[in-house]
Image: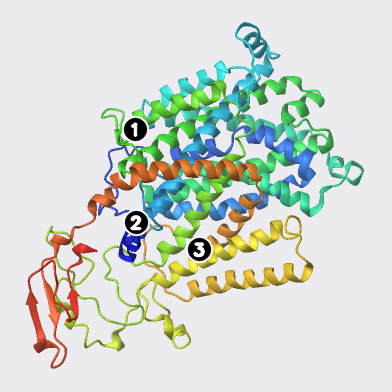
Amino acid sequence: MARWLPRSTDLTRFCQKLNRVKTLEDDMMETSFNRCLSTIDLTLLGIGGMVGSGLYVLTGTVAKEIAGPAVIVSFIIAGFASLLAALCYAEFGARVPKTGSAYMFTYVSVGEIWAFLIGWNVLLEYMIGGAAVARAWSGYLDSIFNHKIKNFTETHVGAWQVPFLARYPDFLAAAILLVATAFISFGAKVSSWLNHVFSAISMGVILFILVMGFVLAQPKNWSTQEGGFAPYGLSGIMAGTATCFYAFVGFDVIAASSEEARNPQRAVPRAIAFSLGLATGAYILVSVVLTLMVPWHTLDPDSALADAFYRRGYAWAGFLVAAGSICAMNTVLLSNLFSLPRIVYAMAEDGLFFQVFSQVHPRTQVPVVGIVVFGLLMALLALIFDLEALVQFLSIGTLLAYTFVAASIIVLRFQQQKGDVPAPAASGRPNPEPHEGPSGGELKEYESFSDKLQLVDRDKSKEQREPGQLKAAFEPYLEFLSDFYPGEVVTVAVVTLMVSAICLCSILVFGSTHLHLPTWSYSLLLVLFSLGFLLSLLLIWAHEQQHSTQTFQIPLVPLSPALSIILNIYLMLKLSYMTWLRFAVWLLLGLLVYFGYGIWHSKENLREPRPQCVSARYVVFPGGSLEERVQAVQPSSQPATGLPDTDTDDCRR
């Protein structure tokens, strides 16, 4: 029976396959896409992804039902929380200017299976998000015409009462998605131009709302007679923050477009900063004027801005607000349709998804197959499915992507840069010149045994610490960590940090409600998991990190990514159990796709060298002088027994 059990070596190789990272090209600016997008183009794409229907609907809903006028504070906190995630995306987008966004960032630093699952969730997130916005666009336009479109469809086509299906087919939502798909397929420049037009109209309407709103503002609407500034207290502000956080999830379209940016090292960080700053300012200022124009408890959650102008005697302003809302939703549609095919392309290009989606049109230089297929799928979702129950699913996919990108920043920052020779952390050994391998490429290990002999006599006075090595100041206290290779301890510490964050947030969310923990155990667990989180953070900080880079770097690493991780995990645990159940089902489907197709067709799997690549072996005989007892032997399938065998060729790794 034991012979059918997998050997430990087989399990080790299998785990290594799951966690292999993507090999980046030497020239990361080389691409089959058209690098035509400027900083302004990327900034407007980001604004279009963030400032959508949420500005016209979300502000009124949160103000009336959750936070009151303190929705302003909720947006400030949510903007800061989004900034932590956005900075991580900015660093990755500048350092790895390839399409794929969170999928690509996870693949180059954490591992293949985690990258696939992130990409798999992002696919569903974009499809549901785009379909939901299309239905909202259709409903908003229908409301302007007194629901004549809905009544006509129900009368002439029919209505049904089927679980998971909409009450009636929304042909208008499907049509707008098909039109947007056609424009996106014409190329990045056409998509960018169309986004410019809608963004300009949307920002013009927002400017009108702010000017008119401040003219009509009445400070008494924040007075105690109307309930005060924060009628729901701190708990209402924090609950509002959790809702407002999702208004900023569109900035990742900038990272997904980095392969089409002219100068991604400069354009991506700037575009993310500009777009997030402008979007945060727009949400805060609109919240201010909305709650000052009319009392917060009288707002209409469905059309707060238009209703506020109507009640102040400016009914004509409602048409401008409606036009701005439709244009804003158009930019969100374009953002979803622009990003989704590029992430699919990145996965297909790496061999993890079906190869047909890696085809780029030679003239328009866009992944036209992915655009058409997923545009049709999105239109089908908007046509017949009830998306209200699935919209919350968007949150968990986004937060999971943010968490992995933040963890990837820590791992990548404490890794050696490409071309460095890995060495034990505190060995202080000088790095010999790399040698050319059999294929002409540069190897990261030492090619010959004579190179290894040079390491016997090392000069500690010339020690130069690599990224991932223990800092000299901590070596006397943490000497037991000096035997690990650079980055190994940091990787383990990141895993420990994430586990501690999950446990800590679980106690905070479920400790007093679902688990009914007594006060002493609740406090004890909080202290223990907080200590685990802080100790992991300090252990990471005790190692050297990369500093000499010409691209943007997020400040205060590892503190900033760690704060982003714990915040994202906390917000994920606040979601309903049905969201987690749907998430688990979608993950299982993704694992079937990965193990049925992706793991076998992965380009990293094809790059793995075979054992016959070994060019030479050196057997060191015990006893005598080290240099005198070296004998070269030819590769063989059965190495000599009883002798310590040292394989110096890196091609089998």
571 w.r.t. 468: above or below:
above
Please tell me whether residue 532 is drawn above or below residue 29 in the rendered image.
below
Q: Position of residue 414 (x, y in %)?
A: 41, 67
Horizontal and vertical percent for residue 462? 29, 85
Q: Tell me the distance, in whole angstroms, between the alpha carbons under discs 2 and 3.
A: 25 Å
Question: Which residue is labeled 3 in the image?
Answer: 555
The amino acid on which the numbered mark 1 sits, given as a three-letter code, is Pro
- Residue in the image at 33% along x and 34% along y: 357
Depicted 458 relative to depicted 180: above or below: below
Residue 39 seen by the camera: no
Closer to viewer: mark 2 or mark 3: 2
Three-letter residue code for mark 3: Pro
Residue type of the residue flagged with mark 2: Val
Residue 62 higher or lower than 106, as above or below: above
**Left or right of 471, for residue 249:** right
How does the figure colour the protein chain or chains? rainbow
Q: Quadrant of the N terminus?
A: bottom left
- Give neighbour class at mark 3: few <14, some 14-19, many 20+ (Cα, 10 Å): few
Which residue is most to the top? 156
Q: Which residue is mark 1?
A: 367
Residue 21, numbered label: 2
Residue at the far right: name it.
225
Residue farthest bottom in this picture: 624
* Res. 332 image quadrant: top right
Quadrant occupied by the C terminus = bottom left
Between residue 287 and residue 467, name the one nearer to us. Answer: 467
